[in-house]
Amino acid sequence: MDLSAIERRLSEFDQTHLLRWAEELSPGQLAALASQLERTDFARWRAEFEKAKTPAAKIDPADVAPIEVFELPQTDAARAEAAADARKGQAALQDGRCGVLLVAGGQGSRLGFEHPKGMFPIGPVRGSSLFQIFAEKILARGRAAGVRIPWYVMTSPGNRAETTEYFEKERYFGLKPEDVFFFNQGESPSVDAATGRMLLAEKGKLAVNPNGHGGTLLALQEEGALADMARRGVDLLYYFQVDNPFVEVLEPAFLGRHLRTESEFSAKVVRKMLPDEKVGLVVLHRGKPMVIEYSDLPKELGEARAAAHGAAAAGGAATAGGLKYWPGSIAIHVFSRGFLERTATALPCHVAKKAVPFIDGAGALQKPASANAIKFEMFIFDALPLARRACIVETDREEEFQPLKNATGDDSPATVQAALMKRAAKWIRSAGIPLETDAQGAPKVKVEISPLAGLDESDFAGRGWPTEPILVPAYFGGEA
């Protein structure tokens, strides 16, 4: 540990205060701080702070146009095309070309659950966790394709240990341990909003924050995940986030469409119905695909309506009389590995002013009531304009987008479980199993279907289940 070299580096960037308490630290604490400082790119964060002084340019509506979307198939020709895409995607699965990437760095604090969010028990009968549901989807896809599918799970430094312990306890939900690759999300320093000086969370520790879901791309490279994919021959990565148990993991048709269109970045979208819905919007911006955050969306674009006769967007991407700009981003993507290798270090930073606790000049911990610091984050969708070719595909909101975000109200355990049971009831009745439901299709008793019992309605119905009426809570798991 060369403290003099570190001091010279800190002096160059006006950060010498970070060693103010060095003499009070134990050897272990000082070594940990020195290691943290040696890993910090001071030049980059100084540059990002300088950029943050200039407000981000607002979106000019004149630069925006609707983007072409592969809409839900409504004709025989469109259904035939989707079936061909599914065959192409299934072939890629069978060839071992596909991996899964899950962003799971968060805690379930907003749900009143002080553990990794992926551990939350969302299954209405067995209490299956989010992690279990995703694992069983991957396992089922692998069995159908006759291959083992690698799963790349991005954790955070704060939840890594508990996540890996949970997987070990649950025996990886039937997956091979060597096929589950854990890696940590990166972090960025919190800096004083007025001076750009980095804050100390403790006398021997920088104040840091997760660098956003866009940091996934950099972490894949830095932690060896991209190298692991190359070793395995994986060149397609199926990305989603931990809060949506309805994700149709490794959907063959989506994979096949990505391949057929020779895309580098493919994104699923849902049809935005209300102008103020809080989802990012996929558009063309100066001729390139882009996601506009709902908070940055000009009101005139958000409220624009399609022509009363005919669709306004290229390829018919707007419903007559509906919103002109409707493709809502839901963070389900397919990436080509070469694209990830090329763009890992290319994403821009976004800034957010937050109240961040810090150690002051007297060594006391301060807990500001208002924003005092800047946090830097990267967003995964900022990679979209970097793709040489992109593919945007509509999916059914009820079938694939039921996120778990809040303790009560919308997007809560109650609404997600109700949606899981309603879909399960539909599948059960389709399989010829008597089950009483209400007028909205909700079952009168709790039901839950494991992905191992069927990946979709027809798969479940074809398993030959007994047809006795369901009168008590029922769980369908594994083979019939």
Image (tube, grey):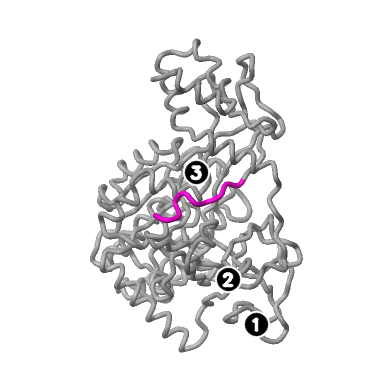
Q: Report how far apart the C-alphas of labels 1 and 2 lie in the structure.
A: 31 Å
| Image location (x, y in percent) of residue 136 | 34, 58
Determine whether 420 is above or below 362 in the image.
below
- Viewer-side residue, 201 vs 244: 201
- Number of the label disc, if any, that sits on residue 440: 2
- Dot 1 alpha-carbon crowd within 10 angstroms: few under 14, some 14 to 19, many 20 or more: some
Q: Report how far apart the C-alphas of labels 3 and 2 lie in the structure.
A: 34 Å
Badge 1 amino acid: Ala
Badge 2 amino acid: Gln
Task: State the predominant SS element of the stretch in magenta.
Answer: loop
Q: Report how far apart the C-alphas of labels 1 and 3 lie in the structure.
A: 40 Å
| Label 1 or label 2, whichever comes before in sequence order | 1
| Image location (x, y in percent) of residue 428 | 41, 71
In the image, farthest residue toward the right: 300
In the rendered image, the quadrant that contains the N terminus is: top left
Segment colored magenta? 341-350
- Number of the label disc, if any, that sits on residue 311: 1
Location of residue 356 (image quadrant): top right
Looking at the image, do the residues carrying marks 3 and 2 touch, with CB atoms under 8 Å apart? no
Determine whether 384 is above or below 432 in the image.
above
Badge 3 amino acid: Gly
**Residue 343 is a magenta residue:** yes
- Number of the label disc, if any, that sits on residue 106: 3
| Label 3 or label 2, whichever comes before in sequence order | 3
Of badges 3 and 2, nearer the viewer stands 3
